Image (tube, rainbow, N blue to C red):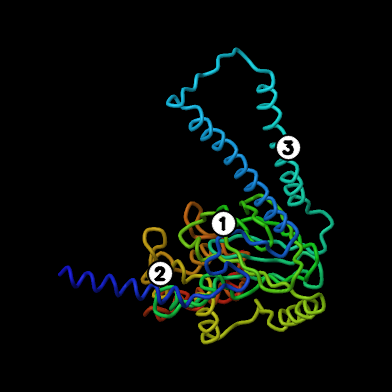
Amino acid sequence: MMKEKGVVGFGALLFSSTVFAQVGDMPGGPQVNQLNLTRGVTQVSSDIMDLHWLLLVICVVIFIGVFGVMLYSVVMHRKSRGAVAAKFHENVGVEVAWTVIPFLIIIAMAIPATRAVVAMKDTTSADLTVMATGYQWMWGYEYLNGPAEGLKFLARLSTPRDQIEGRAEKSDTYLMETDNHLVVPVDKKVRVVLTANDVIHSWMVPDFGVKQDAMPGVLRDTWFRAKEPGIYRGQCAELCGKDHAFMPIVVEVMEQADYERWAAEQMQARQAAADDPTKTYELDELMTRGEKVYAATCIACHQANGQGMPPTFPPLVGAEATVLAPMQNQIDIVLNGRPGTAMAPFRDLLNDVEIASVITYTRHAWGHQGKGPDPIVQPADVTAQR
């Protein structure tokens, strides 16, 4: 039995070593075996790195000085050498030294630290302003000015479920990729206005030297100016719920001409794909659209099989109070959420066509087949309850 356990343990160690050996540097994220901070691509992140090294050097010098004097005193003034302790009441020189020297050290640390903090908080004269809203568990972005003004989208985790559940090999961007990127121009001051829809989140991108909390009902802001094009990654840095680890941030920095081209394409695509909330849709259209919305927005909490995660998220399968009940209650829950629970309101996240589609999908999936009343919900039904 012990031999079997030893073989299994060695095999697991060998397997884990092989898996870790295959992991590569994350583009725009941490590197393999990285032990230090990243210098990043903004002046603020570079200042943070310089400040880090300055404080580390000062601390090391203080450590060596203090413990060096202590060690010297212990060795050179020990009793076996016949040392006799000096006796004196006070020493003006010592009093001045241990007051002035720490004061100078504090000033040496405070000046660059204050300069860096002031620079972090200066969000004035921005070239571009973007609104970022934290949701459980995704980020919503809205461009408030510039060529993409008015453009809104959600950025959700795009790591395949097979990787998360261990059925497939993990990529170098595991849990750090989203279906939509926040796109900004290079060498422009980008102001990010932050808030949250449910609980406290935190918008953090190490390569930008940015970390700012997003709080419900409060507007806060931060900024960055990326000096190099590329893709840069971060995460929500505030423990915000069970899927806190699945809330990445991906920022794509483009040259100005490429950014303007991207903005024009996005605005054109948005107009072409605009949903018509007054249209009456066929069941097949609603089911196809609803399945996509459910997979992107609802599956993390309610699961692919609709069984949910009781008691936080009750099952949708056979739910007589919602899915198999008249549509008004379910529409109200999707629109406004359930106060005091983890069910967030989706009135600002999904349009009426998407809400009608996903509700219709739940009323036909998992063997429901439209058994309850109102098997088909149209966008007009959602609009009427807004």
Q: CA distance from mark 3 to mark 1?
A: 31 Å
Q: Is residue 212 above or below residue 152?
A: above
Q: Residue furthest front?
A: 81
Task: Please state which amino acid type lies under the numbered disc 3.
Answer: Ile
At 40% from the left and 69% from the top, the residue drawn is 316
At 57% from the left and 69% from the top, the residue drawn is 31
Give how far across and how far down residue 33 sits, in percent.
52, 66
Q: Is residue 208 above or below residue 52?
A: below
Give how far across and how far down residue 13 sits, in percent.
34, 71
Give how far across and how far down residue 55 sits, in percent.
65, 46
At 77% from the left and 77% from the top, the residue drawn is 263
Q: Are marks 3 and 1 in contact (CB under 8 Å)?
A: no
Badge 1 density bin: few <14, some 14–19, many ≥20, Cα 10 Å: some
Numbered tag placed on residue 107 in the rendering: 3
Quadrant that contains the C terminus? bottom right
Badge 3 density bin: few <14, some 14–19, many ≥20, Cα 10 Å: few
In the picture of the structure, the residue carrying the numbered disc 2 is 316
Numbered tag placed on residue 268 in the rendering: none
> In the image, is 189 to the left or to the right of 156?
right
Q: Residue furthest left?
A: 1
For discs 3 and 1, the disc positioned in front in the rendered view: 3
Instruction: Point out the tag, 2 or 1, that comes first from the N-terminus.
Output: 1
In the picture of the structure, the residue carrying the numbered disc 1 is 237
